[in-house]
Amino acid sequence: MSTKVEQLAKELYPEDLFGYATGLTEGELNVLKHLREELEARVRPVLIDSYEKALLPREEILGAFAAARIMDHPDLFKDRENKWKASELYNTFLYLEMARFDPSVATFYTVHGGLGYNTILIGGNDEQRERFATKVRQFKAQTCFALTEPDHGSDIAGGLATTAERRGDKWILNGEKRWIGGAKTADFIPVFARDTETKKIKCFMVKGDAPGLSVENVEHKIALRLVNNGHITLKDVEVPEEDRLVNINGYGDVAKIFVFTRADVAHIAMGTAAGAFNAALRLTTTREQFGRKLAGFQLVQEKLARMQANVVSAIAYSVRIAEIQESGNEVMLNSSLAKLHNALRMRETVALAREVCGGNGITLETEVARFFTDAEAIYTYEGTHEINAMIVARELTGIGAFV
C-alpha cells in the first residue's frame, strides 16, 4: 500500500476508521474522487428541488456517472481478467460514495448498473452482452429490472403472473409490473415473464417505446423520491426471440442475480448510514446551544460514537462480502446476512442522526431528513428484513419457514 493510497482513502472516507478503503488501488480511488466531484457539480445544485418535486434529474446523474466513467474506466480493469466488471471492493466503495451523497442516486444506479446490468451479464450470451451491456456501462442507454408485480413481491418465485407466449420467432408478453425503478425513462427493460408452455420464468429485453407497453409512475412516496418507480402494463407486447436472454430459464437463474444485487443493497444501507452520520456530525460540531457546540454534550457524543460504530460494522460486512464475491464463492446466505445486518444498523443510525439534529433534522438543508426517510425504502427492498432473516435461519436450522 502506497502512502498516496492511504492518504487518499483517509481523505475520502474518514468514517472508515479501520481503513478498509486502503485495499483499493490508486486508480479506483481516483475514479471515486472524480465521481464525488461530478456529483457535487452536477447533481447537488438540483438535489433538494428534485427531492421535493419527486423528479429524477436523469441527465445530471447519468452525466456524472458517464464523466467519471464509473463502469468502464481503464484504471478499474488494470490486471483484471474480467472485462465486464470492476473489483467487488471497488463496487462496495462505489455504493458508499453514492449513498453517502444521496440514497436515491445509489438506488437509481443499482437498478441500472446492478440489477439491469447483472441480468444482462448473467442471462445473456456473448452477442447479447456486447449489444446491451456495452451501452449500459457507457451510460449511452438506461436500463432497469422488471420482476415484481402488483400482487407478487416476496412470493414472486411461485407467484409471477406475467405471461410470455411463443409465436414463431417472437414472444407475446401480457401482464403488469410494479415498483420498477427508472422504468418510465428506460431505453430497454428486462421483463421477467412465465412461459405459457413450460411454466418456466424467462427474461425479455423490451424496448422502452415498444407498442403495447405503458408506464405510470407510482405517486405519493415518502422515500427515494428522486427514483421514479413505475407501474408497467404489457398488452400484447412483441419481443423477438433474439432479445430473449437465453440463460434465464427458471427462478434459479433469477436468484443468481440477487446474490450480487442483494449485496449491493447492503452496501447502499452502509452508505446511507455513513451519509446520515456525516451530516449529523457536521451539524453538531457547528451548531451551538446553551453556550456550547451540540457535540460537546455527553448524550450527543454517545450517539455520535454509536453511529460511528454502526458505520464501521456495516463497512466490515460489506467488505467481507466483496472479498467472498471476488473469490467466486458468493451465496445467497451471505448476501442476505449482510443486507439484514446493514439495514438494521442503518435504521438505527438515521434515527440517531435525526435525533441529535433536533428540529433541524427534519429539514432538507441539513441532509439528515433525506437519509432518514430513504432508509425506510432501503430497509424493505431487495428482500425485506423478514425474508432475509428466514434465508439465514433456514441455513441455521435446516427448516424452511417460507409458506
Image (cartoon, rainbow, N blue to C red):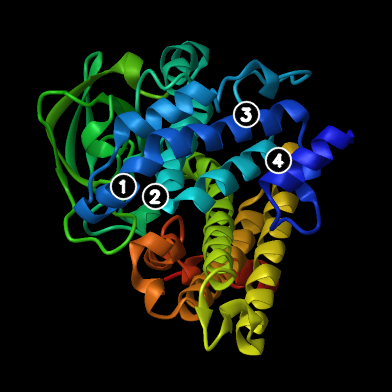
Along the polypeptide, which appears first: circle 1 or circle 3?
A: 3
Mark 4 → mark 2, Cα distance in angstroms: 21 Å
Q: Which amino acid, mark 1?
A: Val
Percent x, y of residue 286: 55, 68
Q: In this view, does 371 lie to the left or right of 268?
A: left
* In front of the other: 85 or 284: 284
Residue at image mark 2: 104
Mark 2 → mark 1, Cα distance in angstroms: 6 Å
Q: In which quarter of the image is the C terminus?
A: bottom left
Residue at image mark 3: 31
Q: Is residue 272 left or right of residue 89?
A: left
Mark 1 → mark 4, Cα distance in angstroms: 25 Å
Q: Mark 4 or mark 2: which is in front?
A: 2
Indicate the quadrant where residue 275 lies.
bottom right
Residue at image mark 1: 227
Q: Do the residues labelled 2 and 1 touch (CB within 8 Å)?
A: yes
x 37%, y 60%: residue: 365
Indicate the quadrant where residue 18 lies.
bottom right
Specify few, some or many for label 1: CA neighbours under 10 Å numbering under 14, 14-19, or 20 or more: many
Q: Which amino acid, mark 2?
A: Ser
